[in-house]
Amino acid sequence: MTTDALVREVLSGDGKVFGKHASHWAALRDGAVPPDWPLLHLVLGEHMLMRDGAEHRRLRGLLSKAFTRSRVEALRPRIEDKREDPGEDLTTTARRRRVRHHA
């Protein structure tokens, strides 16, 4: 999405023009996405990020009760302990692990 108007159109839509679920992706249906694409398992997953409308809101509501600010902050020390290098941020650590996994 490249313009504010397009973003507003997508976000205010009914989920029929633009949808996150893999069934809406023409490139998947047409076979244009290679089977070894590293993110394919995320796109094909049946989870909240790939749901639209009422189902997305239902799942988001369930998660928001479990991941309150205080609960997430309580997890911070355990998450930070997972870093390979205490001097790097978690995004760098995650990227390094993905590269290593797909190498």
Image (spheres, grey):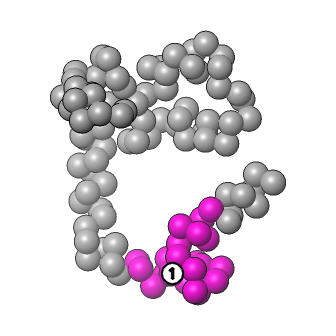
Name the residue carrying label 1: 80
- What residue is shown at x 25% (from left), y 71% (from top)? 69
Name the image quarter holding residue 18: top left
**Which secondary structure dominates the residues rendered in magenta?**
helix
- What residue is shown at x 29% (from left), y 62% (from top)? 66
Observer able to see residue 55:
no
Horizontal relation, residue 59 to residue 99: left or right: left
- Residue 11: x and y in percent read 23, 32
Which image quarter is the N terminus in? top left
Q: Residues within 10 Å of mark 1 (few under 14, many from 20)?
A: some
Is 5 colored magenta in this rendering?
Answer: no
Name the image quarter holding residue 84: bottom right
Observer able to see residue 93:
yes
Is 82 colored magenta in this rendering?
Answer: yes
Helix, strand, or loop for circle 1? helix
Q: Amino acid at mark 1?
A: Glu
- What residue is shown at x 66% (from left), y 17% (from top)? 31
- Residue 29: x and y in percent read 57, 15
- The answer to whether 87 is drawn above or below residue 89 in the figure is below
- What residue is shown at x 55% (from left), y 41% (from top)? 42
Which image quarter is the C terminus in? bottom right
Name the image quarter holding residue 37: top right
Picture mark count = 1
Foreground pick, 53 / 30: 30
Q: Give the magenta-colored segment's residue range.
A: 75-95
- Residue 28: x and y in percent read 58, 21
**Residue with the most extreme right position:** 103
- Residue 59: x and y in percent read 30, 44
